[in-house]
Image: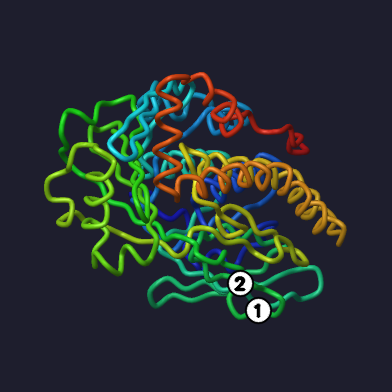
């Protein structure tokens, strides 16, 4: 377990340049980069780390490029990440295998804990198992209310970064804050199997597409099989359980069935395709899944989060030193260029995967001409646009 580096009461006695709420990839990397920019940073999360969460657990070339750019190029390899070489797509009993160079599989337990430790080494103070509630804007500062068990305290900061994920509640109830869920959006679900058939070999991302959903599977660094799915809510309603829905899709696609799917410890997510109507407020930036999310393809979700964490840091350091309302529009523009453009590509891909007949036809075509997939894979795995370094 990663221990807290201070208590809520101790945090309240210090002056903070920034409070980052949410210690996933976006929040942890943003906190680290802010600290490297000489800011006093408090990182808060309600969970205990290491922790598991619903995720495809793939870092694509873009995600690894961001880590290299911030000096963490050895992080994934040092945690035992499994190199990914192939992407196997199955639909309607047909399969196609495509090359997938440059990515790795790594559990979120390992990745998130590694990023948090890197942030702490850079001077970030960490408060796990702590709920945060956004307080008032008071002149040149914001307040954040912290609660951990029976302990409660209020901290004051020059800047807040909201990176508390799809189901984040930091901004709930505040005027002008709204999240729009795309009509017909699917929901996510995931589980981990301790053992699985040998057909699910390491180094391959498996994706099964069927009526009402898709299921992605990949071997992790410790040999477990990670399962991440997106379902039409109507399918879940008919099947009553995500494990039963996943079994139906695997069977339709023609991939091997996993024994005991319904007995696994499944967890769900809110609607996957959503966006915040605003991504910046006075002395507050929204990033990561809290800013907007689209069903990912093969590792884009983590890449978007890391890219946002890197990109926001330079603006945040400027905002700490001297807040200017123009920073709000600037962050929205940077976010659109850095994250939202890639999400548009994935939205189009996911709409296509939602139609089994279209997906099966695409698989048939790619079996004959696999090179046709190369431009799409390059686009979703492209390196992060340059966003500038953190001022020193």
* Residue at x 57%, y 39% (from the top left corner): 122
Say if mark 2 contacts mark 1, CB within 8 Å.
Answer: yes
- When the figure is inspected, residue 83 is found, relative to residue 137, above or below; the finding is above
Find numbered disc 2 in the image and state the secondary structure of the residue it sits on: loop
User: Taking 159 as reference, is 82 left or right?
Assistant: left
**With 199 as the anchor, is 273 left or right in this view?**
right
Residue 67 position within the rendered picture, expressed as x and y whole percent measured from the top left: 56, 31
Q: How is the image coloured?
A: rainbow
Residue 282 pos. (x, y %): 78, 67
Q: Is residue 144 above or below residue 317?
A: below
Residue 320: mark:
none
Asked whether 95 or 33 is in front, the reply is 95
Q: Quadrant of the C terminus?
A: top right
Question: Residue, x 70% and y 60% (percent of image)?
Answer: 279
Alpha-carbon neighbours of circle 1 within 10 Å: few (<14), some, or many (≥20)?
few
Mark 2 is surrounded, within 10 Å at the Cα level, by few (under 14), some (14 to 19) or many (20 or more) other residues, namely: some
Q: Position of residue 350 (x, y in %)?
A: 50, 47
User: What residue is at 69 percent from the left and 66 percent from the top?
Assistant: 277
Q: Is 143 rendered above or below residue 218?
A: below
Q: Position of residue 128 (x, y in %)?
A: 43, 59
Find the distance from the CA under tag 2 to the CA under tag 1: 6 Å
The residue tagged 1 is 174
Residue 99, by quadrant, is: top left
How many labels were placed on the picture? 2
Viewer-proximal residue, 169 or 83? 83
Which residue is denoted by mark 2 in the rendering? 171
Residue 309: quadrant of the picture: top right
- Residue at disc 1, secondary structure: loop
Residue that extends furthest to the left in the rendered view of this protein: 259
């Amino acid at each position: 377990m990663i221990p807290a580096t201070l208590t809520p009461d101790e945090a309240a006695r210090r002056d903070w340049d920034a409070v980052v709420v949410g210690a996933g990839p976006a929040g942890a990397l943003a906190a680290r980069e802010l600290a490297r920019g000489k800011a006093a940073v408090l990182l808060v999360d309600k969970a205990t780390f290491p922790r598991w969460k619903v995720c495809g657990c793939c870092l694509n070339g873009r995600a690894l490029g961001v880590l290299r750019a911030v000096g963490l190029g050895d992080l994934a390899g040092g945690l035992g990440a499994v190199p990914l070489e192939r992407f196997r797509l199955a639909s309607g009993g047909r399969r196609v295998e495509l090359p997938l160079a440059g990515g790795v599989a790594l559990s979120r337990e390992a990745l998130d804990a590694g990023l948090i430790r890197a942030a702490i080494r850079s001077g970030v103070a960490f408060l796990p198992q702590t709920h945060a509630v956004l307080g008032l804007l008071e002149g040149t500062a914001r307040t954040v209310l912290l609660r951990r068990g029976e302990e409660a305290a209020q901290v004051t900061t020059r800047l807040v970064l909201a990176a508390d994920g799809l189901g984040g509640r930091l901004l709930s109830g505040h005027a002008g804050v709204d999240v729009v869920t795309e009509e017909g959006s699917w929901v996510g679900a995931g589980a981990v199997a301790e053992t699985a058939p040998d057909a699910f070999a390491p180094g391959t991302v498996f994706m099964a597409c069927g009526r009402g959903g898709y299921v992605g599977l990949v071997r992790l660094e410790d040999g477990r099989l990670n399962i991440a799915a997106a379902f039409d809510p109507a399918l879940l309603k008919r099947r009553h359980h995500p494990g039963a829905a996943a079994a139906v899709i695997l069977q339709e696609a023609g991939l091997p069935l996993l024994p005991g799917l319904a007995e696994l410890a499944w967890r769900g997510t809110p609607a996957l395709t959503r966006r915040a109507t605003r991504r910046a407020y006075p002395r507050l930036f929204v990033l990561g899944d809290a800013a907007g999310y689209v069903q990912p393809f093969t590792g884009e979700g983590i890449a978007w989060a890391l890219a946002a964490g890197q990109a926001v840091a330079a603006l945040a350091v400027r905002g700490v030193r001297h807040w200017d309302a123009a920073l709000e529009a600037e962050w929205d523009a940077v976010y659109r260029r850095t994250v939202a453009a890639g999400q548009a590509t994935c939205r189009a891909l996911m709409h296509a995967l939602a139609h089994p007949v279209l997906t099966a036809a695409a698989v048939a075509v790619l079996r004959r001409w696999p090179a046709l997939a190369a431009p799409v894979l390059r686009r979703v795995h492209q390196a992060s646009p340059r966003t500038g370094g953190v001022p020193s």
